[in-house]
Amino acid sequence: LVLILDYGSQYTHLITRRIRTLSIFSLCISGTSSLKSIADLNPSVIILSGGPHSVHSADAPSFPDGFVEYVEKNGIFVLGICYGLQLIVQKLGGVVAIGEKQEYGRMVIEVVKDFGGLFKGKQIGDKQVVWMSHGDEAVGCQLGLRWWRGASRVRWRRWRIRVGGFMGCSIIQRGWMDGWYEIKVTHSPEGMDLLRHFFFDICGITDGWKMEDVMEEEIKVIKGMVGPDDHVICALSGGVDSTVAATLVHKAIGDRLHCIFVDNGLLRYKEQERVMGTFERDLHLPVTCVDASVQFLSELEGVTDPEKKRKIIGKEFIVIFDAFAHDLEKKLGRKPTYLVQGTLYPDVIESCPPPGSGRTHSHTIKSHHNVGGLPKDMKLKLIEPLKLLFKDEVRELGRILDVPVSFLKRHPFPGPGLAVRIPGDVTQGNALDILRQVDEIFIQAIKDAGIYDVIWQAFAVFLPIKTTGVQGDQRTHSNAVALRAVTSQDGMTADWYYFEHKFLDDVSRKICNSVRGVNRVCLDITSKPPSTIEWE
Ligand code: XMP
């Protein structure tokens, strides 16, 4: 296990991800975790992340007392990045100075290869492109540590710390680590290679981490956790996470899993049919499909405030979920004990941000909700089999579990469904019907053009205005719709997708020619920020 102690760098997730792509299991916990929680994980390598603090500030986060002794005693390799490096240097009696100037962005550094440490036995170019982002710098160490400063313009320094003859720490300035993971794809062809060298050649890691093993392990855990008389419930949203989580639990405990899929009247074109087909035909999941569209839409009638709409939808889901659990109790003669949720690793990390990380959920842009919000009085225990996985790993797990690839690659769809794509009252006119048809034409065209997989999310929006048009020599006064397609890594930021003109022309024609009530098609060309991906 490679354990990352997080001091608040924005790149901590990325480091964890990059290491996993080498088939090495990595976990990230708070940099201020206790020595016991670190030791319980039994890591063979520890990485101290960067972070926004200065080691000189009063509230500078740090590893626990006894950490250095623990590392030495157990022969654990430690890699410090930026703040992590400065922390080690300071804790070992070295000097961290406030840098003469701050260094941000792309820089070229020179590598001294005969120094050993990280580069021992490694063929690497003399010059490397790295990304710097630091103010303080470690300028010297006591304890007889060697330190090296390169040619006058070189801004990179490296230490190899000898502790009692054992190379306990190879410490590296942030620029390099940035170089490893960020530059890997476009800027530094040698970055990933260096990581590989560090873990396999220097640290001697031999274990391969495979998704098949993750699956077996999770099944074992679920079997051990859920007793023979226990029943488990799960709300399926039609999204990848809840589907993969349910499929995994089903494999472990069979039909003691009871799933519910709610049609809230805000789904896409033929969505119910399509997802139920996958659940039942392809995955053999025991699913109850509840058509609650009348209930949802009557609660939403006349409501125009986006936050109010979301809250109503969230509340209705809980009412239905509650009724499902009670029905099940009557049928089984006992209450279900567990609830499956498709929580992913980023949610787990995000929910306990390290001090000073700037990562917080406190600023609510939209009150997101997922299907399966937990009614407080149900007292269900949670099964979260994906909570150590990232999204692409969940897709990989889904593939092993035989979830159809076309399903795994579906664009994300928000819990409140089409309600956030109809500004204003969702029950106005035949807005929902129009939107479904337009969306289907747009998505099908994207699939036909072979660009579905490069787009993070694409959809249509119903505009609550009427504009003048001329169709078949007649004046029309009909609705306008907007098309939105974005590229993104994680939905946190996004750029609008650059379609070819011909594609847009074809789609626009097809929409106006075949969807009654639409005479105008607009394209949303805003990124996030300043817009959000959804319109509400
Ligand atoms: P925004 O619109 O906030 O969306 O830029 C970012 C991503 O989140 C999805 N989204 C939601 N997902 N419940 C969800 O499960 C919600 O209430 C919700 N609102 C937005 C959105 O589709 C995009 O992928």
Image (cartoon, rainbow, N blue to C red):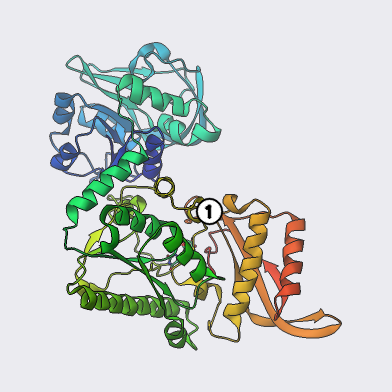
Task: Specify whether residue 59 is in view.
Answer: no
Q: What element carries label 1?
A: helix
Give how far across and how far down residue 270 sits, in percent.
Answer: 55, 70
Amino acid, disc 1: Ser
Give how far across and how far down residue 207 sits, in percent.
Answer: 30, 29
Report the residue at 34% width, 33% height from top: 24
Vertical comparison of 8 with 146: above or below: below
| Residue 287 placement: quadrant | bottom left
Relative to residue 167, is residue 36 drawn left or right? Answer: left
| Residue 497 placement: quadrant | bottom right
- Category of crowding for the residue at label 1, using alpha-carbon neighbours closer than 10 angstroms: few (below 14), some (14–19), many (at least 20): few
Q: Quadrant of the N terminus?
A: top left
Nearer-the-camera pick, 447 or 85: 447
Relative to residue 203, is residue 459 drawn left or right? Answer: right
Residue furthest to the right in view is 473
Label 1 beta carbon within 8 A of ligand 1 = no
Report the residue at 32% width, 45% height from top: 215
Give how far across and how far down residue 361 sits, in percent.
Answer: 35, 61
Residue labelled with disc 1: 406
Give how far across and how far down residue 481 sits, in percent.
Answer: 66, 73
Task: Specify whether residue 458 is in view.
Answer: yes
Nearer-the-camera pick, 504 or 220: 220
Vertical comparison of 529 with 320: above or below: above
